[in-house]
Amino acid sequence: MWRRGIVLAACSVFITLVIVFHAQIPNSVGNLGSLTETFLPCVMLLVPVLLVLGLVRRSATALIALILPVVVWLNLFGGLLTDKSGTGGDLTVATHNVNADNPDPAGTAQQVAGSGADVVALQELPGRQVATYEKSLADRYPYHSVQGTVGLWSKYPLSETRPVDIKMGWTRAMRSTVTSPSGKVAVYVAHLPSVRVKLHAGFTANQRDDSADALGEVIADEPLERVVLLGDLNGTMNDRSLNGVTSQLRSTQGAAGDGFGFSWPASFPMARIDQIMVKGVEPMSSWTLSATDSDHLPIAARVEL
């Protein structure tokens, strides 16, 4: 019983080492470190597999070894499993990558607006569908601006609205001041470049990383104390390559959410690459909305200004 399952026990030790030392996995080889960090919470899915194999092998060694990755994973991510949402808040925001090929833009717009959000950010807006989104949201949101392929709709006045250069060659980010009854807040909307996993190139995230650095520099120069970032960052809070942004802002899901709040892919969410991040405001609640005809799930949060 004790001699059997040595290989399974070694797998548990390996998983534990990946969780503990993920920051030491180099990005110099196919951005392997960032790829690991993107799906780091999902490493726990390997534990039930090893558990079943250990039971089949009747190996006490393999079963005991499973304690290591479980304890380490809970130490790192256990806090996300509790419900940290609270009551209160004076501004509700929502963000959604609507998908350029969305077959029902009007329905998607109405569904996101139905969340009761005061401010809605949309990404991946194709030019041919912008008018549809504008018409669908006009009744609820008297103020809006579309910059390139991103847009912002608000119940409150917008000012100082401008595109933000994230080094892509076309506009996929913007900034605006929302003047709410509780005060002004700088709202950024961003859609960072997509990433892919290719056999010959690994995790192709270099362009995204450069855009994240550019966005971080702009946010660092923001004169308003209250800042909200809404958008598809094509990366998670664990990914070191987004430090230019994540070092300045905190995630509403981590501060006031219930669970991981995975947003992609909509059919089987495995990562939270859509983000609501804040500075100078207090997150009160954060949640994922029901699926639309997009490949992303919309997310929302309530904050206290």
Image: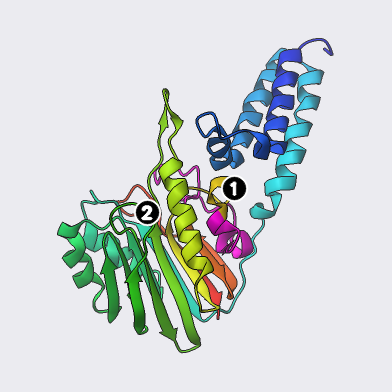
Task: Give the number of callouts.
Answer: 2
Instruction: Count neighbours of disc 2 (C-alpha within 10 A) and say few if under 14, some if 14 to 19, many if 20 or more.
Output: some
Q: Residue 105: give x, y in percent of width and height.
A: 23, 59
As drawn, 15 above or below 170: above
For label 1, the SS is loop
Report if residue 15 lies within the magenta region.
no
Residue 5 seen: no
Cα distance, mark 1 to mark 2? 23 Å
User: Principal SS element in the magenta part?
Assistant: loop
Give the magenta part as a residue range: 244-273
Q: Which mark is residue 167?
A: 2
Mark 1 lies on residue: 238
Which residue is nearer to you in this view: 10 or 56?
10
For label 2, the SS is loop
**Amino acid type, residue under disc 1 in the picture:** Asn
Quarter of the rendering containing residue 136: bottom left
**Coloured how?**
rainbow
Q: Residue 169: give x, y in percent of width and height.
A: 29, 53
Residue drawn where x is 55% and y is 56% of the image: 244
